Image (cartoon, helix red, strand yellow):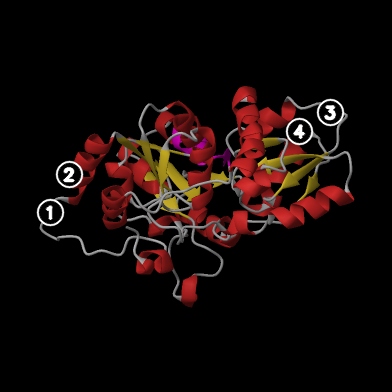
Amino acid sequence: MVKKEWKDKGFVDEAVDKAIDLKKEIRRLCEEKNAIILAHYYTVGDVQDVADFVGDSLALARKAANTDAKVMVMCGVHFMAETCKLLSPEKTVLCPDLNAGCSLADSCKAEDLKKFKDEHPGYQVISYVNTTAAVKALTDVVVTSGNAKKVVDKLPEGDNYIFGPDYNLGSYINEVTGRKMLLWNGGCHVHERFSVAAIAKLKEEHPDAIVMAHLECKGPVIAAAEIVGSTATMLDYAKQNPTKEFIVATEAGILHEMQRSCPDAKFYPVPPEVSEGGLGCSCNECQYMKLNTLEKIYNNLKYEWPSVEVDQEVAKDAVKPILRMLELS
């Protein structure tokens, strides 16, 4: 029985006995329910540590499509849980907190995209994975920051395309592919805030450090970086150069896996241009990702709520561009 107060809050708000070993109990519940925990690199370290699989959006989508588990707990944001459900409709997909949204997904509503498509007949839609299922249902092919160039390179050059919702990623892909895609003017509230001046300051302090930036960052930040790409791209580069120093312009959660994988390396997070509350925060965090906690995961598994469902009519069209992406990448 789902309580009204849970529905109102968007998560199971039940006290957890402080005496129990949460990580051990979570793993016990996973075994009992044949469940797998998937976590994005931007979640907190404790969540990444308890997960069966940690990755970026592309890796998580591939895992969701191929897992044998009956239950998936997606520790990320809501669109990721929807993607899991689209790829494995027969499975139960749990989401620890329904409030874990995404500013980028919010920047492109399905009704607005439909209107834009109607205004540009003949254009195909390339959507970043950071979108709702309803937007994906209006999309021809989905991409992630890890495979966007690869996918776009395989699309016919003579066709017309709309790329959304991330303007920065679309602008970068236009530049490196020579395409002239129409760009949706959306952005990630985390990656939009990185400071070029702070990169320069950190570079002065650590002249041998390699600057790495996520493709959702603004053009000047990308231009200041030596390594640009997805979180997985940056992590892989650090693993190949494990004793170096790195200046990192992406959400701070990735530092946990970077430090775990490269204990001898040093990582310096780039602070935002404007800190939360003007308090001079030294890192840039996604508050939505941080809504995933061990307590919520435990209750999510225990009560099997919140779960994520996608309307069947929407799902029928929304899964097609995701499968096309997986085929092309």
Image location (x, y in percent) of residue 157 = 84, 28
* Residue visible at 43% across and 53% down in the picture: 252
Element under disc 2: helix
Residue 117 seen in the figure? yes
Amino acid at the residue labelled 3: Glu
| 298, above or below 173, in the image | below
State which mark lies toward you, 1 or 4.
1
Q: Give percent across and percent down for residue 249.
A: 52, 51
Asked if the residues shown at circle 1 and circle 2 are in contact, with their CB atoms under 8 angstroms apart, the answer is yes
- Residue identified by numbered label 4: 177
Q: Amino acid at mark 1?
A: Ile
Residue pointed to by mark 2: 24
Against 275, is 124 above or below? above
Crowding at dot 4, Cα within 10 Å, few <14 / some 14-19 / many 20+, comes out as few
Q: Is residue 228 above or below residue 20?
A: above
Residue tagged 1: 20
97 sits to left or right of 106: left
Label 2, label 4: how many angstroms apart (C-alpha)? 48 Å
Q: From the image, tell me which residue sits under label 3.
A: 157
Q: Residue furthest front?
A: 1
Q: Is residue 119 left or right of residue 34?
A: right
Q: Which numbered disc, 2 or 4, marks the residue closer to the eye?
A: 2
